[in-house]
């Protein structure tokens, strides 16, 4: 179907006075009767909402509606203009599920609607749904009663509704040091993804590499800092989430990328070549507790992008900076009300560590970036710290 194409069909329209229109709309929506793509009707002081039912509402359905909407209403069988696929992917997803259920002679219930995801990641043409998408009891039953071909049809429609060609569902992230994600492919087979963001190409195997699209603003912020000619150490490089923007956009002179996951390194090297910056990149494979000490005194800047905390390498990171000092970008999960005190404590700890290393630096927190909510009480923050030689001492 083309976006915006108008299709007509005969279906249920429920009417009430304009004054009660929004209450009726809310009630029909809560009962999952409302057709998200059907145009509403208007006639002299009355408004009518298109429903997904193609035959008159049953007594039971009318009873449910009366409970939620205790005002006068009436239903008609009318011609409904459907506005075609919505530009809103949430509506498109909802509509494709209703359609799929209809083809199976089933009606989407509240439990089905609750199992429809409200967020997902788009990695190129691969849509990655969260762990709990289409996974509650109602969906296990609906999919259990469907043939493989019918299930495949649903997954293809979901991928399409969300603007993709392949579909995967997140599985529990492996409990290993690499935090390799597991994904279950629902539509398509290959797990290799390629995409570009902010003019930077990325590529990796989504079944082996963790990538958080939620960090997009931070990637853009880091990529907007002028690093012309600088040598940078990225202590947790992954598939290049920050390494690549620092090379391509910030114009860093060289990035030393520390990473222990071979699959991330494969993606990082592939993307470095794709972006034409492979000559500006050195990859240090293995545990950064072993690789960072070899980079002592080389860097103008050190990026520490590990959650919940990168504290394990703070001392190594300080040692990586040139004796003339430089910058640290410290990622951390911090309780919302403790961000300022955490920043103060971090500067104090870094100060003590620098002292142990024999660096006479003045260390200052220059900026705290609140990246996103990690959980209701915890924020993912990045602290930009500057270390400059302390002129007050000798
Ligand atoms: C959280 S991921 C990076 C995710 C990225 N910051 C994002 O926003 O999408 C952290 C990376 O650090 C790597 N890593 C974790 N511990 C490490 C260590 N001790 N040495 C080297 N790499 C490590 C992991 O393999 C992973 O690729």
Image (spheres, rainbow, N blue to C red):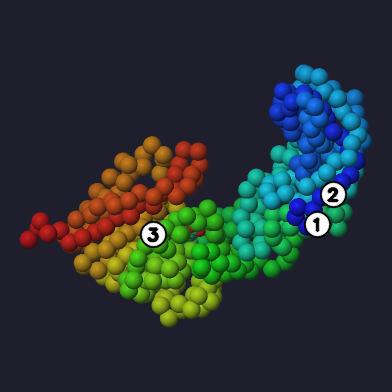
Q: Residue furthest left?
A: 394
Q: Which image quadrant for residue 107?
A: top right
From the viewer's perspective, tell me whether residue 225 is left or right of residue 101.
left
Q: Residue at x 91, y 34 (%)?
A: 77
Please identify the quadrant where the N terminus is shown: bottom right
**C-alpha distance separating marks 1 and 3:** 47 Å
Residue 45 image offset from top left, x and y in percent: 77, 25
Mark 2 lies on residue: 7
**C-alpha distance separating marks 1 and 2:** 10 Å
Camera-nearest label, 3 or 2: 2
* Residue toward you, 87 or 215: 87
Q: Is residue 116 visible?
A: yes
Camera-nearest label, 1 or 2: 2
Placement of 218 over or under 268, stated as above or below: above
Placement of 192 over or under 153, stated as above or below: below
Q: Is residue 333 visible?
A: no
1 and 2 marks in contact (CB < 8 Å): yes
3 and 2 marks in contact (CB < 8 Å): no
Q: Disc 3 beta carbon < 8 A from ligand 1?
A: no
Placement of 383 over or under 232, stated as above or below: above
Mark 1 lies on residue: 1
Q: Residues within 10 Å of mark 3 (few under 14, many from 20)?
A: many
In what element is the residue under mark 2?
Answer: strand
Mark 3 lies on residue: 304
């Amino acid at each position: 179907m083309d976006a915006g194409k108008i299709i007509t069909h005969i279906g249920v329209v429920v009417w009430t006075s304009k004054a009660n229109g929004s209450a009726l709309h809310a009630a029909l929506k809560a009962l999952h009767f409302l057709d998200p793509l059907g145009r509403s009707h208007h006639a002299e002081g009355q408004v009518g909402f298109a429903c997904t039912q193609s035959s008159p509402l049953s007594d039971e359905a009318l009873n449910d509606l009366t409970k939620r909407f205790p005002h006068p209403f009436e239903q008609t069988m009318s011609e409904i203009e459907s506005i075609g696929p919505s530009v809103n992917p949430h509506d498109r997803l909802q509509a494709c599920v209703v359609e799929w259920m209809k083809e199976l002679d089933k009606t989407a219930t509240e439990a089905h609607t609750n199992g429809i995801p409200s967020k997902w990641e788009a990695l190129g043409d691969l849509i990655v749904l969260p762990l709990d998408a289409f996974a509650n009891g109602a969906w296990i039953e609906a999919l259990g009663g469907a043939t493989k071909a019918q299930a495949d049809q649903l997954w293809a429609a979901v991928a399409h509704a969300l603007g993709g060609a392949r579909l995967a569902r997140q599985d529990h992230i492996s409990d290993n040091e690499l935090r390799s994600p597991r994904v279950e492919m629902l539509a398509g087979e290959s797990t290799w993804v390629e995409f570009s963001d902010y003019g930077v190409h990325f590529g990796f195997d989504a079944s082996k590499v963790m990538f958080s699209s939620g960090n997009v603003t931070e990637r853009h912020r880091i990529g907007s800092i002028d690093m012309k000619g600088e040598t940078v150490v990225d202590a947790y490089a992954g598939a290049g989430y920050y390494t690549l923007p620092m090379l391509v956009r910030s114009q860093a002179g060289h990035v030393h990328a520390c990473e222990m996951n071979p699959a991330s390194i494969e993606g990082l090297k592939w993307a470095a070549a794709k972006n034409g910056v492979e000559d500006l990149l050195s990859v240090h494979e293995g545990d950064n507790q072993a690789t960072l000490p070899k980079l002592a005194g080389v860097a103008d800047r050190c990026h520490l992008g590990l959650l919940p905390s990168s504290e394990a390498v703070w001392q190594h990171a300080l040692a990586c900076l040139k004796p003339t000092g430089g910058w640290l970008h410290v990622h951390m999960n911090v309780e919302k009300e403790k961000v300022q005190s955490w920043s103060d404590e971090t500067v104090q700890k870094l100060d003590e560590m620098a002292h142990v290393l024999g660096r006479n630096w003045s260390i200052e927190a220059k900026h705290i970036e609140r990246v996103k909510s990690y959980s209701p009480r915890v924020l993912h923050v990045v602290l930009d710290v500057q270390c400059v030689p302390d002129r007050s001492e000798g």
